């Protein structure tokens, strides 16, 4: 009996599933190859993100000192340490989220620049495979980079993470990554439709999340209407969950109030992002917008 890729009911059979998974891995591998090709730019991005986080950490340390709680006998107080961790989590997550959006939208921009995007769209694979492969690379690489930077800033500031629930924080980040993948797919439609203005619109979306999600402050200080709007951002729950785990040492069972909104948003945003991207792709093909740019 020969293997069948698609069943009579339209479902992907075992051989088709294997091919799609292989293709998804191929897109992830392609992104790693591109990263190696432009490794100097990647090094610039890492250094920029790390120095920005360290600068924010020193800013938090200065604020704690100015308020009289910075150092006691040359030793950083617990309050100062908590403030620094609070600010650093916001900085690291912002770097992760910005990197995720940049990676996903930049892939589309690269392909338009090189004139290969039409050939990619003609490949005999589903669009879900392509998008999830691109997002998979961004998530795997972004989580690894964030962990490395968290370790680096912990060494620089001699942070006491002995009571932190690091596993719980990483669980929140992993679950939240599915929502970020959906958002990344949604914003990828902009550079697909316009190579010049698309990246700018992506920056606007990032800026809105920076404002509403409480990257560098608690949501409670925002106006009431902004507090309600912040509940629509997955970054709000990722930040709160990671801060609860790392700053307060909350057990994983206590993080459910942040995990379930992330699960729901992931279930909604990933299919929505794929649907919107598909509609945008068909529109661009029909109107001839996939021509080489540059």
Image (spheres, rainbow, N blue to C red):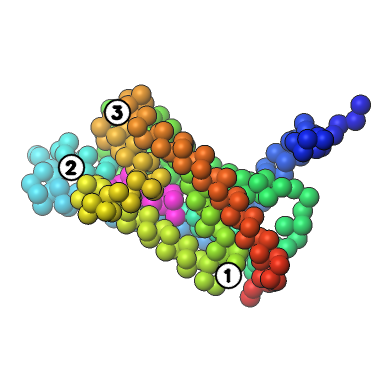
Front disc: 2 or 1: 1
Residue at 46% across, 37% down: 264
Please rate how many residues cluster around mark 1, counting C-alpha atoms within 10 Å: few if below 14, some from 14 to 19, many from 20: some
Q: CA distance from mark 3 to mark 2?
A: 19 Å
Front disc: 3 or 2: 3
Residue 143's disc number: none
Q: Is residue 110 above or below residue 139?
A: below
Front-most of residues 165 and 6 = 6
Pointer 1: what residue?
A: 194
Residue at 35% across, 55% down: 210
Horizontal side of 114 relative to 99 (left or right) equals right
User: Element under label 3?
Assistant: loop
User: Element under label 1?
Assistant: loop
Horizontal side of 47 relative to 132 (left or right) equals left
Front-most of residues 278 and 178 = 278
Query: Residue 214's x, y, as percent?
Result: 30, 50
User: Element under label 2?
Assistant: helix
Q: Is residue 92 magenta?
A: yes
Image quadrant in which the N terminus is located: top right
Quarter of the image holding residue 282? bottom right
Number of residue marks: 3
Q: Of the residues under marks 3 and 1, which one precedes in the sequence?
A: 1
Q: Is residue 124 above or below residue 15?
A: below
Pointer 2: what residue?
A: 80
Give the residue furthest to the bottom: 294
Is residue 16 visible in this depiction of the protein? no
Give the residue furthest to the right: 1
Image quadrant in which the C terminus is located: bottom right
What span is colored magenta in the figure?
A: 87-98
């Amino acid at each position: 009996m020969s293997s069948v890729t698609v069943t009579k009911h339209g479902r992907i059979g075992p051989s088709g599933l294997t091919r799609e998974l292989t293709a998804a891995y191929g897109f992830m591998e392609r992104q790693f190859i591109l990263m190696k090709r432009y490794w100097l730019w990647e090094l610039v991005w890492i250094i920029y993100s790390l120095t920005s986080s360290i600068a924010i950490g020193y800013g938090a340390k200065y604020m704690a000192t100015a308020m009289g709680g910075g150092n006691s006998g040359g030793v950083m107080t617990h309050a100062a340490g908590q403030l620094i961790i609070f600010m650093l989590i916001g900085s690291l997550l912002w770097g992760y989220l910005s990197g995720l959006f940049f990676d996903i939208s930049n892939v589309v921009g690269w392909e338009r620049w090189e004139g290969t995007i039409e050939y990619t769209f003609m490949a005999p694979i589903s669009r879900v495979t392509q998008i999830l492969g691109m997002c998979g690379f961004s998530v795997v690489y972004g989580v690894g980079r964030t962990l490395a930077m968290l370790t680096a800033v912990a060494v620089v500031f001699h942070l006491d993470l002995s009571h932190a629930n690091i596993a719980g924080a990483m669980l929140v980040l992993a679950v939240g990554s599915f929502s970020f993948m959906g958002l990344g797919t949604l914003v990828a439609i902009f550079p697909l439709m316009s190579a010049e203005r698309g990246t700018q619109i992506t920056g606007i979306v990032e800026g809105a999340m920076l404002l509403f999600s409480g990257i560098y402050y608690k949501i409670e200080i925002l106006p009431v209407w902004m507090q309600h709007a912040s509940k629509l951002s997955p970054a709000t729950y990722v930040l709160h969950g990671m801060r609860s785990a790392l700053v307060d040492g909350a057990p994983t069972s206590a993080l459910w109030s942040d995990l379930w909104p992330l699960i729901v948003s992931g279930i909604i945003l990933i299919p929505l992002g794929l649907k919107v991207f598909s509609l945008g792709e068909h529109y661009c093909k029909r109107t001839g917008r996939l021509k080489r740019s540059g």
